[in-house]
Amino acid sequence: MIVLGGEIIGEGWNRVIATRDPTAHGEMVAVRDACRRIGNNGLQGCVLYTSGQPCPMCLGAIYWARIERVFYGFGTRDAAGIGFDDHFIYEQLARPAEQRAIPEIPLLRAEALEILEAFAADPGRVRY
């Protein structure tokens, strides 16, 4: 759950199997719910309570949303004990990109930079 000023503003639980969506972790569902409820993509000043230490995907969302603090029960090593691969992903992220299990291959950098620069130059762009 996500709490702001003592009030629950977002709730979520694991929906991966139910929705066939690998991103539907409880933390992700709670972030989406909180943002929808408050009408903003930022959750500054909020606290997240979750049963397990967030995986890298959820941690990324937590940082992007600017959540202030996270409280959790079991850790990534505990989760690995029942088959969740969060610890493996943390290990992969600690490696240089060229040494990871899934290759990351640069492609069409010049064209991609043109798109990025056009986006950066757009005076109507919404900053987040």
Image (cartoon, helix red, strand yellow):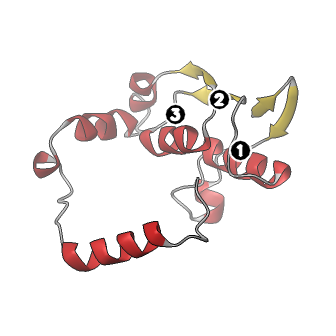
Q: Which residue sits at x=72%, y=30%?
A: 46
Asked whether the beta carbons under mark 2 and mark 1 sit within 8 Å of each other, the answer is yes
Q: Tell me if mark 3 has few (under 14), some (14-19) or many (20+) residues whose alpha carbon lies within 10 angstroms of its own.
A: many
Q: Which residue sits at x=46%, y=38%?
A: 55
Q: Report how far apart the C-alphas of labels 2 and 1 lie in the structure.
A: 10 Å
Q: Tell me if mark 2 has few (under 14), some (14-19) or many (20+) residues whose alpha carbon lies within 10 angstroms of its own.
A: some
The mark nearer the N terminus, 1 or 3, is 1
Asked whether the beta carbons under mark 1 and mark 3 sit within 8 Å of each other, the answer is no
Disc 2 secondary structure class: strand
Q: Which residue sits at x=71%, y=44%?
A: 30
Judge left or right: residue 2 versus residue 99.
right
The spot of residue 53 in percent (x, y) is 52, 27
Which residue is under mark 1?
30
Query: Quarter-wise, where is residue 95 in the image?
Result: top left
Asked whether the beta carbons under mark 3 and mark 2 sit within 8 Å of each other, the answer is yes
The mark nearer the N terminus, 2 or 1, is 1
**Is 37 located above or below residue 8 in the figure?**
below
Q: Which residue sits at x=58%, y=52%?
A: 128
Is residue 26 visible to us here? yes
Task: Report the amino acid beneath label 3.
Answer: Pro
Q: Which mark is residue 54?
A: 3
Q: Tell me if mark 1 has few (under 14), some (14-19) or many (20+) residues whose alpha carbon lies within 10 angstroms of its own.
A: many
Task: Report the amino acid beneath label 1.
Answer: Ala
Which residue is under mark 2?
50
Task: Report the amino acid beneath label 2.
Answer: Thr
Disc 3 secondary structure class: loop
Q: Report how far apart the C-alphas of labels 1 and 3 lie in the structure.
A: 12 Å
